[in-house]
Image (cartoon, helix red, strand yellow):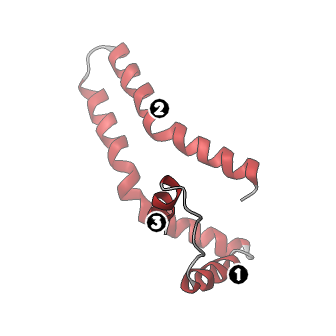
Amino acid sequence: MGFRNLIEGLLNRKPTRIPKIFNKLSFYLRKLSTSPLKVFMVGILAGILLLPCTSTPYLVILSLLSTLENLYEGLILLILYNIVMVIPLLILTLGVYLLRL
């Protein structure tokens, strides 16, 4: 879906409608998000599934930091990590909050 919308946007075409199967999935997920316990459980599941993807760059940075003798080199690597990994997530979170998506 996202790739198709990206291509249509680059070609200046009007976005197409969401397929019916995604409408049903969206309705189910919205229905699921009414209970705080269900939202918490989905958050735990998402954390478990995303952990292998998100922890790898962090472990690489930590291993590089442990081998460095100079504190400033480690600080530069940590700042670079935050620019590449953390700031985009903060921008997305702020954008969703401000746009009330």
> Could you say which is closer to the camera, residue 50 or residue 1?
1
Label 2 crowd (10 A; few <14 / some 14-19 / many >=20): few
**Mark 3 or mark 2, which has the lower sequence index?**
3
Q: Position of 95 compared to 20: left or right? A: right
Circle 3: element type: helix
Label 1 crowd (10 A; few <14 / some 14-19 / many >=20): few
> Could you say which is closer to the camera, residue 36 or residue 95?
95
Tell me what residue is drawn at x 65 percent, y 76 percent: 38
Identified by mark 2, the residue type is Ile
Tell me what residue is drawn at x 67 percent, y 47 percent: 95
**Quick check: 44 above or below 20?**
above
Label 3 crowd (10 A; few <14 / some 14-19 / many >=20): few
How far across and how far down the image is residue 54, in percent? 40, 51
Identified by mark 3, the residue type is Arg
Q: Position of 100 compared to 26: left or right? A: right
- Which quadrant of the structure image shows residue 30? bottom right
Identified by mark 1, the residue type is Lys
**Mark 3 or mark 1, which has the lower sequence index?**
3
Circle 2: element type: helix
Q: Which residue is mark 1?
A: 31
How far across and how far down the image is residue 11, in percent? 48, 56
> Could you say which is closer to the camera, residue 17 or residue 81?
17
Circle 1: element type: helix
Residue at the extreme front: 12
- The label shown at residue 83 is 2
**Mark 2 or mark 1, which has the lower sequence index?**
1
Q: Which residue is mark 3?
A: 4
Comparing marks 3 and 2, which lies closer to the viewer? Answer: 3
Comparing marks 3 and 1, which lies closer to the viewer? Answer: 3
How far across and how far down the image is residue 47, in percent? 49, 61
**Spatial separation of the CA atoms under disc 2 and disc 1:** 35 Å
**Quick check: 39 above or below 19?**
above
